[in-house]
Amino acid sequence: MGIECETCGAPAQPGVVKCFYCGRPVNEEIAKNAIACPACKELNVWGAQRCIKCQAWVVVQCVFCGAISPHTMSACMGCNEAFAGAPERKAARDAAVQSQQNVQTAVAVGGVAASFLGAVAGGVIGGLLDD
Ligand SMILES: [Zn+2]
Ligand SMILES: [Zn+2]
Ligand SMILES: [Zn+2]
């Protein structure tokens, strides 16, 4: 545990990209993966969910799998769905699944109706034969 600033050697605070003392990124790795806050542009470390400065969300949640990815990513890190137009695609897929379920329900109801009618028809024929 404990990272030191590569520039001045000061102990870095966890979750903070820029050194408290010299204002430079603590190290290259952290700077490379840093996520700029969409609201205040403050750099946040990779894995942060809210801006250390203004508490704005720096991650987005995938509507498909629920995984969170930095807002700078163009696609979900969990399922690779592109974020652009994701809610619309989700809605379209949900609608497709819904209509498919409706078709299945209709088939099931149709089957029940057919066997019910068949039983009635058999009963009528049986009655006729008894006479
Ligand atoms: Zn420093
Ligand atoms: Zn911010
Ligand atoms: Zn996803």
Image (cartoon, rainbow, N blue to C red):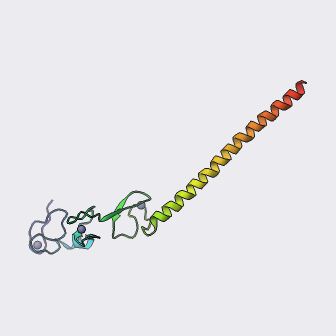
Q: Position of residue 98 (x, y in %)?
A: 57, 54
Q: In the current view of this chain or complex, which residue is farthest to the top?
A: 130
Q: Quadrant of ligand 2?
A: bottom left
Q: Is residue 109 left or right of residue 37?
A: right
Q: Quadrant of residue 116?
A: top right
The residue lying toward the viewer, choosing from 84 and 82, is 84
Q: Position of residue 125 (x, y in %)?
A: 86, 31
Q: In the current view of this chain or complex, which residue is farthest to the right?
A: 131
The residue lying toward the viewer, choosing from 40 and 52, is 40
Q: Quadrant of residue 69?
A: bottom left
> Measuring 38% from the left and 64% from the top, which residue is drawn there?
77
The N terminus appears in which quarter of the rendering?
A: bottom left
Q: Quadrant of residue 2?
A: bottom left
Q: Is residue 42 left or right of residue 99?
A: left
> Measuring 84% from the left and 31% from the top, which residue is drawn there?
124
Q: Position of residue 36 (x, y in %)?
A: 26, 71
Q: Position of residue 4 (x, y in %)?
A: 12, 67
Q: How many marks?
A: 0
